[in-house]
Image (cartoon, grey):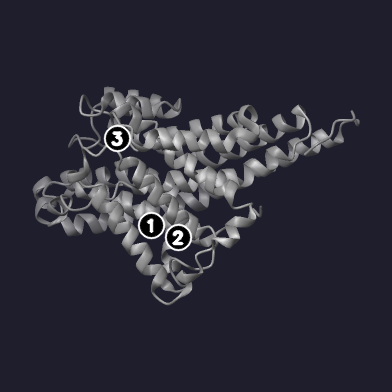
């Protein structure tokens, strides 16, 4: 399968990160909140953006990794590919994640007169959980019980890191039975009541993404291409319609539905399936698509940065505005504008000076390791 960039997947990343932003604005960390946002959350919520991220991750990772691993003829070649995959993932994700963990902890210690960043103890524990990739388990333990800390969004990053570690091993163990194992994993979770712990380790969306990637290499994938969506407005209406259903199902009236999370994962998988053909089915070329693709390319940084940016604006208002926090309550739109501007600026800087350089550094390290391996005397080992 080609490893070329799929712009329609980047578009969905943009949609996903916007969903997360709107969800956190519904419980805006500024006094006063935004007019209409809290009342609107009764009818629709947007935390399903995280599930969309999970499906995208499963699809993108499996699309490149599974063909590589299945092409390996020896255990040595298999483990070499896994090593290279883990190195690339580590350089892609960890530098930004660790940087913002440290910056948030610095905010707690040095820029926290209003208490916006929370307590030192909670944030020390949250930082440790983020560094060691068990933030999802801490999130489940703390949910509705005690303060997590500013870096609470790291629960989903930890789940994805665990997925990156385990997926190659699952491929090795399951081999030709991988499809059935993943289907069983999705089916079991579809009607399972999600406790806080199961919400923090939900793998049905990730598994659906992997299944989509595996299907994309089969002839039937082309047969089922949704060509009807090439008609004018059909694709955008599909995108808006699915997003609306996702938002309604994420709202309080469905809180007690055991099937809710499973259905959200399936609907997100539908969007990723449509986007995977990369034929502008969801949104035609234009300024709006360019904006969403731009957001998608920087979605990782936006996801890491948006909460500390909200809290930094709240702290800044507390310190420097004449009326302190009360000014935020009377000027929430201005506060939001400042927060969004800060998010855009910092995510762009993070993308240019952290994400891209470290991603390239990881790729160069893999190339050096491969070159050093190929320079060794031939041992008769067959590579991938």
> In the rendered image of this protein, does residue 232 appear above or below residue 127?
below
The C terminus: image quadrant: top right
* Mark 2, residue position: 11
* Mark 1, residue position: 15
Q: Residue furthest bottom?
A: 232
> In the rendered image of this protein, does residue 322 appear above or below residue 155?
below
- Please tell me how crowded label 3 is: few (under 14), some (14-19), or many (20+) other residues with Cα within 10 Å: many
* Mark 3, residue position: 150
Say which element carries label 1.
helix
Marks 2 and 3: which is nearer the front? 2
Q: Pointers 2 and 1 in contact (CB under 8 A)?
A: yes
Task: Note whether residue 214 is visible.
Answer: yes
> In the rendered image of this protein, does residue 12 appear above or below residue 126?
below
Image x and y of residue 285, in percent: 47, 73
Frontmost residue, 99 versus 88: 88
Point out the tag, 3 or 1, that comes first from the N-terminus: 1
Which residue: 39% across, 43% down?
A: 304
Image x and y of residue 236, in percent: 38, 68
Any mark on residue 350, and which?
Answer: none
Alpha carbon separation for disc pair 3 and 1:
23 Å
């Amino acid at each position: 399968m080609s490893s070329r960039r799929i712009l329609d997947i980047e578009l969905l990343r943009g949609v996903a990160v916007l969903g997360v932003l709107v969800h956190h604005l519904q419980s805006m960390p500024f006094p006063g909140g935004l007019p209409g946002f809290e009342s609107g959350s009764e009818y629709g919520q947007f935390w399903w953006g995280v599930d969309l991220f999970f499906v995208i991750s499963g699809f993108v990772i499996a699309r490149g990794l599974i063909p590589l691993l299945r092409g390996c003829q020896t255990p040595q070649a298999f483990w070499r590919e896994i090593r290279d995959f883990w190195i690339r993932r580590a350089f892609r994700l960890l530098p930004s994640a660790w940087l913002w963990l440290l910056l948030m902890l610095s905010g707690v210690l040095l820029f926290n007169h209003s208490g916006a960043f929370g307590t030192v103890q909670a944030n020390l524990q949250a930082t440790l959980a983020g560094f060691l990739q068990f933030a999802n388990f801490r999130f489940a333990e703390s949910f509705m019980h005690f303060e997590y800390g500013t870096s609470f969004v790291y629960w989903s990053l930890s789940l994805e890191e665990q997925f990156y570690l385990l997926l190659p091993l699952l491929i090795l163990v399951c081999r030709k039975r991988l499809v059935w194992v993943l289907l069983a994993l999705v089916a079991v979770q579809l009607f399972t009541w999600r406790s806080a712990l199961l919400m923090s380790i939900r793998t049905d969306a990730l598994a659906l993404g992997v299944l989509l990637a595996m299907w994309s290499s089969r002839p039937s994938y082309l047969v089922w291409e949704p060509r009807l969506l090439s008609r004018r407005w059909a694709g955008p209406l599909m995108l808006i319609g699915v997003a609306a259903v996702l938002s309604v199902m994420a709202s309080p009236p469905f809180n007690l539905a055991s099937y809710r999370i499973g259905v959200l994962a399936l609907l997100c998988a539908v969007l990723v399936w449509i986007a995977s053909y990369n034929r502008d089915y969801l949104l035609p070329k234009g300024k709006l698509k360019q904006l969403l693709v731009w957001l998608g390319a920087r979605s990782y940084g936006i996801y890491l940065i948006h909460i500390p940016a909200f809290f930094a604006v709240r702290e800044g208002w507390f310190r420097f505005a004449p009326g302190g926090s009360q000014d935020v309550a009377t000027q929430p739109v201005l506060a939001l504008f400042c927060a969004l501007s800060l998010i855009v600026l910092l995510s762009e800087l993070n993308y240019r000076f952290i994400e891209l350089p470290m991603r390239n550094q990881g790729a160069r390290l893999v190339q050096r390791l491969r070159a050093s391996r190929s320079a060794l005397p031939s041992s008769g080992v067959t590579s991938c």
